[in-house]
Image (spheres, helix red, strand yellow):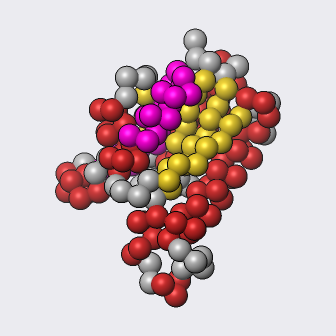
Amino acid sequence: MYKHLLVAVDGSHTSENALEHAIGLAKSEEAELTVINVANPTEYMALAPEFLQHESYEAAALSEGNTVLDDAVNKALKQLPQDRVHRHLLIANKGAKEMAQMLVDYADEKSSDLIILGTHGRSGLMHLLMGSFAETVMRETNLPLLIIRSDTNGEG
C-alpha cells in the first residue's frame, strides 16, 4: 500500500514515537523511509550569544538538525535495509507555517505516500501561543497524514 513514507523528527520524545511508528510501518510495508528535519535558525536567536557554540544561528540549526537526523537514521537502520532509509535536512527561516509548507512540498516532490508526524496535542492557550505544526501540515497537504500523539504521562 505504501511505497515511500516520510517522517519528521526534531529530537523530541514525541517525534521519537513517530519515528518508531514510521520504522514499523516501513518494515511491514517494505517501503522506503525518508527521515526529515526542518531546521529553523530563528529558534536559536533566543539563546544568549555566549551559549551559541557556532559562528551563526544557521550553523547551530544545521548542526542540531544533522545530529537529530543521524540519531534517527541510526535507529531506522537497525530494522531497515540501508537502501530504503533516506535523510533530508530543510532550512526554514520563518515560522511554523513556512516549515510545514516546506515539508509538504518536499513530500510531494519525492512522491511520498504518507507523512508521519508527532504532535504534543496542545490545546487552548498553549495551542494559540505555540501554534500547531501538525495542524498546519494537515491543512496544506493532500497526502495521508499519520499523527502520533505524545504519551499521556506528560512527556514530549
Residue at x-position 37% and y-position 37%: 137
Left/right of residue 132 with respect to residue 147 in the rendered view = left
Who is closer to the viewer here, 68 or 20?
68
Residue 13 seen in this snapshot: no
Place of residue 37 in the rendered image (x, y in percent of width and height, measured from the top left): 55, 48
Left/right of residue 137 with respect to residue 62 in the rendered view = left
In magenta segment, residue 109: yes
Who is closer to the viewer here, 73 or 109?
109
| View extreme (top): residue | 1
Specify the quadrant of the image occupied by residue 4: top right
- Quadrant of the frame with the N terminus: top right
Residue at x-position 52% and y-position 28%: 109
Q: Is residue 62 above or below residue 70?
A: below
Q: Is residue 106 above or below residue 69?
A: above
| Highlighted magenta segment, given as a residue range | 101-122
Residue at x-position 64% and y-position 50%: 69
Specify the quadrant of the image occupied by residue 129: bottom left
Q: Is residue 41 above or below residue 88?
A: below
In magenta segment, residue 116: yes
Place of residue 21 in the rendered image (x, y in percent of width and height, measured from the top left): 58, 33
Residue 137 seen in this snapshot: yes
Left/right of residue 81 with respect to residue 68 in the rendered view = right
Total count of labels: 0
Residue at x-position 32% and y-position 39%: 135
Place of residue 57 in the rendered image (x, y in percent of width and height, measured from the top left): 50, 71
Place of residue 18 in the rendered image (x, y in percent of width and height, measured from the top left): 53, 39
